[in-house]
Amino acid sequence: MRTLPCCSLLVLALAACTQPATAPSPPAAASAAAPIAALAAGERRIKMSDGAEIYLKVAGKGPVCMLVHGGPGQGSLSTEKMGADKLEDFLTMVWLDQRGSGKSPDAQDYRLERVVQDFDEVRRALGADKMCLIAHSFGGILAVEYAKRYPQHVSELVLANSTLHFLGPENSRMQIAFVNRLLGRTVVAVADDANEAALAEGRERARAALMKSGKGYRFLTENTDSIRVMSEIDGGYERSRGFGNAIFEQRGAYPEYWIDYAPVSARIRSPVLVITSSKDYAVGPDEYKRFRFAHQKTVTLDGGHISYYENNAEFVAAIREFMAGRR
């Protein structure tokens, strides 16, 4: 079975571990809450209109919220088991594995339009009129695209440690600077006017140097225990990897995943909670500053990319407060 390319945000750190402000309230018309639907709990598989199969698990109580995991292709299990399941105390969580990810089998079509259509077909199959989306990392792009295409079915968005420009030039400059600072030397020097291709090449050289130093995990966290726990969970079952492989190996076929969605965020009218972290060097501690949501609340945590685990109490409390304030 193939493994995800090493440049995936999470896989890079997993491999390295084995080596030595509040916005104005939205108008009343935009504040319709997701219905508190009593969805049937448990695991299930749902066939999509194109024949692909989606795995999901429903658990909890309260407004319906779907997890939009990152990766690409990570799967939902480690997020759930590393503390995000505490959200089930006040939310009906839909732990969904995107097509070709986690427990959802590989598929033929990984276009962004098709992936977010899956989300809506699942919503309809579950009988939910509206739902909130809780996105992590790369999942932010998917959540924003869903909110753009299906605004009438989105009650809220929560973007946790999310990027809206996957491995874009902003990310390249940030990671190069971080590696230079962490290793105490100029591993990679880039010109102020360097183009995107030069920045991407420099980022890969910087990543390789950090991996060689045994500190590749530092993009995600300062704590190797977090990586160990995630690795044990994700390595404990046979995962589909088609989505992640397709995005990297067939980049030309899926250009939509590589463009900047920060401008698109200005078109989203749903209330948005952004959870960012001061030591997140996977997407960058300042990535959220590029977002342009009309109704955005931002909470900054003192930690890294895996905030749902390392800052679990604050993570859960921020979402609880945000959701409670909407009802």
Image: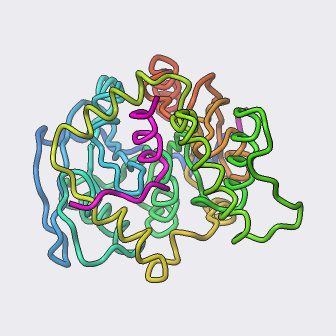
Which residue sits at x=75%, y=41%? 180
Of residues 311 and 49, the one nearer the viewer is 311
- Image quarter where the N terminus lies is bottom left
Residue 261 vertical position relative to residue 176 in the rendered view, above or below:
below
Q: Residue furthest bottom?
A: 253
Specify whether residue 11 is painted magenta. yes
Q: Is residue 24 visible?
A: no
Between residue 41 and residue 102, name the one nearer to us.
Answer: 102
Residue 93, compared with residue 130, is above or below; it is: above
Residue at 37% from the left image edge and 62% from the top image edge = 244
Q: Outermost residue, top direction?
A: 313
Q: Residue at x 18, y 37 (%)?
A: 236
Q: Is residue 182 left or right of residue 310?
A: right
Does residue 172 appear to the left or right of 87 in the view shown?
right
231 to the left or right of 295? left
Task: Give the quarter of the image for residue 88.
Answer: top left
In this picture, which residue range is highlighted in magenta? 1-23
Residue 206 picture location, percent across and down: 66, 50
Residue 163, horizontal then vertical, whole percent: 58, 52
Please say if 11 is above or below 113. above
Residue 184 showing in the rendered view: yes
Is 194 magenta? The answer is no
Magenta part, dominant SS: loop
Query: x, y (%) of residue 143?
Result: 47, 56
Q: Position of residue 273 (x, y in %)?
A: 57, 39
